[in-house]
Amino acid sequence: MIEIVAYNALWAKDFLQQKEKIQNALEGNALAVHHIGSTSVPHLAAKNIIDIQVTVAEFTNEIERGLNRIGYKRLHHILSDHRPQGYDHLSEKQLSKWFFISNEPAVNLHVRLQHSFNQRYALLCRDYLRAHPYAAKAYEEIKKQLAKHFQNDIDAYYDIKDPVFDVIMSGAELWSEKVGWKPQMAE
């Protein structure tokens, strides 16, 4: 069941606790650990699942073992992110990821390659929504309506949400050029 809940300030605290565990478990293999997704945007309603991005130089078995040791389970069937319209030129490597879940707290963990399109996409969209509260509120309303109409259909929810987020990405790209935004390695 898809449920959008009010912003919870504890999400940031939960992220910091998970970040420390992840960094310790990966022993230097994590180049960066970022809080991403809707729970990373202050005052934005979201699914009560923290999204975390771990940036790595390469995918290694050592990374998977380290995350398994601290309770993260890899979903092996998820190997890449959604390809936005107009980005047909991207290689599979630019969209590749390893995806892990954990239940306490609920976390979706995305392991992505440094300098890849999808690694940048997550950070750019997060920072854009943080800097544009009206865009964030409009996005929140879309998610609430999608959850209301597709409460038990996660595929339909994402079939609509992903292209909407691509529209946000277009605005975020223009904003990044205007302000000189660059992804930061430290949170």
Image (cartoon, grey):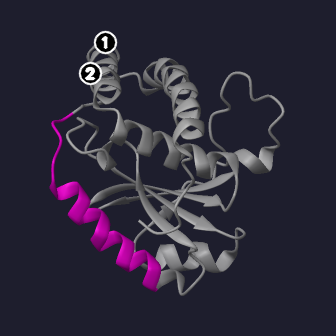
- Type of the residue with mark 2: Lys
Q: Are marks 2 and 1 in contact (CB under 8 Å)?
A: no
User: Percent from the top left, x then y, of residue 46?
Assistant: 27, 37
Q: Quadrant of the N terminus?
A: top left
Q: Residues within 10 Å of mark 2 (few under 14, many from 20)?
A: many
Residue 70 appears left or right of 66: left
Q: Residues within 10 Å of mark 1 (few under 14, many from 20)?
A: few
User: Percent from the top left, x then y, of residue 106?
Assistant: 30, 55
Counting residues from the N terminus, which is met first, the one under dot 2 or under dot 1?
2
Give the magenta range: 5-24
Q: Secondary structure at mark 1?
A: helix
- Type of the residue with mark 1: His
Pair 2/1: label in front: 2
In the rendered view, tell whether residue 105 sits above or below residue 156. below
| Residue 68, magenta (yes or no) | no
Residue placed most toward the observer, 104 or 59: 59
* Residue underneath mark 2: 144
Q: Quadrant of the C terminus?
A: bottom left
The residue sitting at 21% across, 65% down in the picture is 13
User: Percent from the top left, x then y, of residue 38?
Assistant: 34, 41
Q: Which mark is residue 164?
A: none
User: Percent from the top left, x then y, of residue 83?
Assistant: 68, 32
Specify the principal SS of the magenta part.
helix
The residue sitting at 49% across, 73% down in the picture is 67
Rounded to the nearest angstrom, the CA distance separating label 2 from label 1 is: 9 Å
| Residue 23, magenta (yes or no) | yes
Q: Secondary structure at mark 2?
A: helix
Quarter of the rendering containing residue 169 = top right
* Residue underneath mark 1: 149
